[in-house]
Image (cartoon, rainbow, N blue to C red):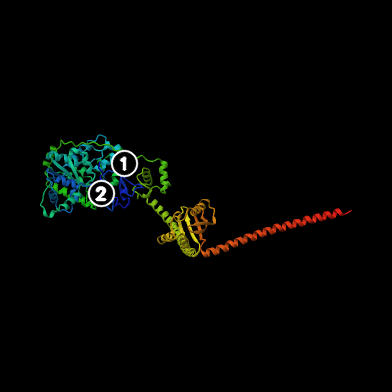
């Protein structure tokens, strides 16, 4: 079926209040999701989450526009109002004014569901008084029915096989007014929207809650002050008007609720109904009673009523309304109508829709309990703040994927404290790193300034050199050059320099002949420096030295124009000095060789003389 409950992710504050009140845990909490996820298949339409959500992020399906469309049609429309309407609209002084307000919306007939409740009460009287050893659970509350079908499927056969007053009244209306009518039910129950879809033959076209009805009044600007009295249309109910109170159906059926002789136990409210189903499932033979269950504290407190209503005030208003109606009630006429509509089929069937999840293995549950700090057997009662009665149930839900450990306040608090400590340490480290970073930035600024000054000095020195200097990369693109190098290249290079200072990025191959730029290639590939190589360039003779700056990546060159007077004088001096140095080196070598030879000769002569003297002796 279409989801009844909707979650607005933008409004949700992730407080998990809705998760905690959901009796069947149809709201799943996942770490990868920012908000709870509604598991439609598990939802029983109780509406507990609606009142628990403070930021109003949860809403139910609205049928106001559907109702207006039906009312604007050509067919006559019947409004069936739940008996709890007398407790809901305490702000309207007389119920007859209220009936007239409904007519003003466009309804042809306005019927109270109390007569249908009377017929159903009679069915329960026949079923429960003719006890044949089987105990029943009343099926008037669609939330209770869904609860059993989904989470206590073994109790389906114990659900009383009787339709609800809403469906019974719709069948009465069809019989009285014919098939060519439209029916809109107005009541306190959100789950009734889905229940109506289960009984298509009853012909309930749509279901409105009391809050939706109030919205329609506001939209059409309908107030009681301008209207006359108008009473409900036939058939009118008897004690069925008390159906809005939890044990009203029991009294309408004249069933004994006495502690000694009574066989019916009434329970209402989220907690009591859950407990009642658990105990009915386990101990019904010992309890030996039928259960009359209403999920809300009576229909007067349904999720489709005005939020914040006073339960006992509403109960009092319902009783006063019923007493007022019964003061001059024509019971004979009512009994005739009961006979008239007694042939309607009040039976129904139920269908199991088991949504129970397998329980995790004991080892897995123990592991989860240890994770949330509840590994000790004596420390598992829990505080129920997570929405589960015990830590064990909470651990089971985590294992089933319905909850996360963060839903546990104790676990979350411990993690928060650990996180704060970790955050504190991290902040201390960050502060230390920030100090170091500031010091590093200060050092970097000084180094940058020093490098900038050094760069400026180098550039200035480079420009002051009388020789041409150029630095190129591995692609023979100029990285830097001085003015003297540009002057050597000539006027074309000077024009380029005006646009691109230092010829940065220019290709050496386009500026120098092959014989020169090939020297750069050689040094780049071989890493062998070339020193003082004379090369003709136009009418000039250039002396070129190429040397490695970064191996195979960057080379530099010093280029001198040998025809310039100052270069010639310097070069002559350098070369003469070089020749003199070489000659002196040669003379020294000759002198050394001559000295060595003279010594050897002297030694030889001395040897001959000595030998000769020895031969002269007798």
494 left or right of 610 in image? left
Pointer 1: what residue? 279
Q: Which quadrant holds the N terminus?
A: top left
Front disc: 2 or 1: 2
Q: Is residue 55 positioned above or below 332 on the image?
A: below
Disc marking residue 412: none
Residue 224, position as x, y percentages in the image: 13, 53
Q: Are marks 2 and 1 in contact (CB under 8 Å)?
A: no
Residue located 28% across and 46% down the image: 270
Q: CA distance from mark 2 to mark 1?
A: 32 Å
> Looking at this rendering, what residue extends furthest in the right direction?
618
Q: Is residue 81 left or right of residue 30?
A: left
| Disc 1: CA contacts within 10 A as few (<14), some (14-19) or many (>=20) | few
Provide the secondary structure element on which disc 1 rests.
helix
**Mark 2 vs 1, N-terminal side:** 2
Q: Position of residue 21 (x, y in %)?
A: 30, 48
Along the horizontal axis of the image, is 326 left or right of 608? left
**Percent position (x, y) of residue 404?**
37, 47
**83 or 64, which lies in front?**
64
Residue 427, x across and y down, in percent: 43, 58
| Residue 594 in sight | yes
Disc 2 secondary structure class: strand
Nearer-the-camera pick, 253 or 359: 359
Q: Which residue is mark 2?
A: 59
Looking at the image, residue 490 lies above or below residue 41: below
Say which of 509 and 49 sits in front.
509
């Amino acid at each position: 079926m279409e989801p009844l409950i909707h979650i607005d992710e933008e409004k949700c504050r992730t407080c998990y209040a809705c998760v905690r009140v959901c009796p069947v845990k149809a709201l799943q909490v996942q770490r990868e999701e920012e908000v709870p996820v509604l598991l439609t298949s598990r939802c029983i339409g109780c509406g507990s989450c609606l009142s628990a959500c403070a930021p109003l992020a949860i809403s139910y399906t609205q049928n106001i526009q559907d109702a207006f469309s039906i009312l604007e049609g050509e067919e006559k429309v019947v409004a069936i109002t739940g008996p709890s309407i007398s407790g809901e609209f305490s702000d309207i002084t007389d119920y007859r004014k209220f009936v007239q307000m409904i007519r003003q919306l466009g309804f042809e007939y306005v019927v109270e569901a109390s007569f249908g409740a009377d017929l159903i009460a009679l069915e329960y009287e026949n079923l429960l008084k003719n006890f044949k050893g089987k105990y029943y659970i009343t099926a008037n509350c669609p939330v209770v029915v869904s609860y059993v079908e989904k989470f206590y499927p073994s109790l389906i056969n114990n659900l009383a096989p009787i339709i609800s007053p809403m469906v019974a009244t719709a069948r009465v209306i069809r019989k009285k007014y014919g098939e060519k009518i439209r029916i809109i039910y107005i009541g306190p129950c959100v789950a009734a929207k889905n229940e109506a879809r289960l009984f298509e033959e009853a012909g309930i076209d749509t279901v409105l809650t009391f809050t939706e009805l109030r919205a329609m009044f506001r939209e059409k600007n309908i107030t009681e002050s301008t209207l006359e009295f108008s009473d409900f249309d036939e058939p009118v109910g008897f004690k069925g008007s008390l159906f809005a109170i939890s044990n009203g159906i029991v009294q309408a059926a004249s069933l004994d609720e006495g502690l000694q002789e009574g066989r019916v136990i009434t329970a209402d409210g989220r907690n009591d109904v859950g407990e009642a189903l658990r105990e009915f499932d386990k101990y019904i033979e010992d309890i030996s009673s039928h259960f009359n269950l209403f999920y809300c504290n009576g229909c007067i407190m349904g999720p489709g009523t005005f939020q914040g209503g006073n339960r006992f005030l509403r109960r009092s208003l319902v009783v006063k309304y019923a007493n007022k109606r019964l003061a001059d009630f024509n019971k004979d006429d009512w009994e005739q109508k009961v006979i008239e509509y007694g042939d309607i089929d009040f039976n129904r069937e139920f269908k199991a829709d088991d949504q129970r999840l397998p329980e995790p293995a004991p080892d897995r549950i123990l592991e989860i309990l240890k994770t949330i700090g509840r590994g000790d057997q004596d420390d598992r009662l829990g505080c129920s703040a997570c929405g589960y009665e015990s830590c064990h149930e909470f651990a089971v839900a985590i294992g089933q994927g319905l909850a996360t450990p963060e839903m546990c306040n104790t676990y979350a608090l411990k993690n928060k404290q650990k996180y704060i400590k970790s955050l504190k340490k991290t902040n201390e480290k960050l502060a230390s790193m920030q100090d170091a970073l500031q010091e590093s930035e200060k050092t970097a600024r000084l180094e940058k300034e020093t490098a900038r000054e050094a760069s400026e000095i180098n550039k200035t020195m480079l420009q002051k050199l009388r020789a041409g200097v150029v630095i190129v990369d591995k692609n023979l693109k100029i990285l830097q050059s001085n003015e003297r190098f540009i002057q050597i290249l000539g006027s074309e290079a000077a024009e380029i320099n005006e646009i691109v200072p230092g010829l940065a990025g220019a290709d050496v191959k386009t500026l120098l002949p092959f014989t020169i730029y090939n020297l750069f290639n050689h040094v780049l590939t071989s890493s062998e420096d070339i020193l003082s190589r004379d090369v003709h360039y136009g009418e000039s003779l250039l002396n070129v030295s190429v040397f490695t700056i970064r191996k195979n990546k960057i080379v530099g060159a010093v280029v001198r124009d040998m025809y310039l007077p100052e270069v010639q004088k310097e070069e002559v001096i350098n070369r003469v000095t070089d020749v003199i140095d070489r000659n002196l080196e040669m003379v020294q070598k000759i002198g050394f060789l001559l000295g060595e030879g003279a010594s050897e000769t002297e030694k030889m002569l001395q040897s001959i003389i000595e030998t000769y003297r020895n031969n002269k002796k007798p």
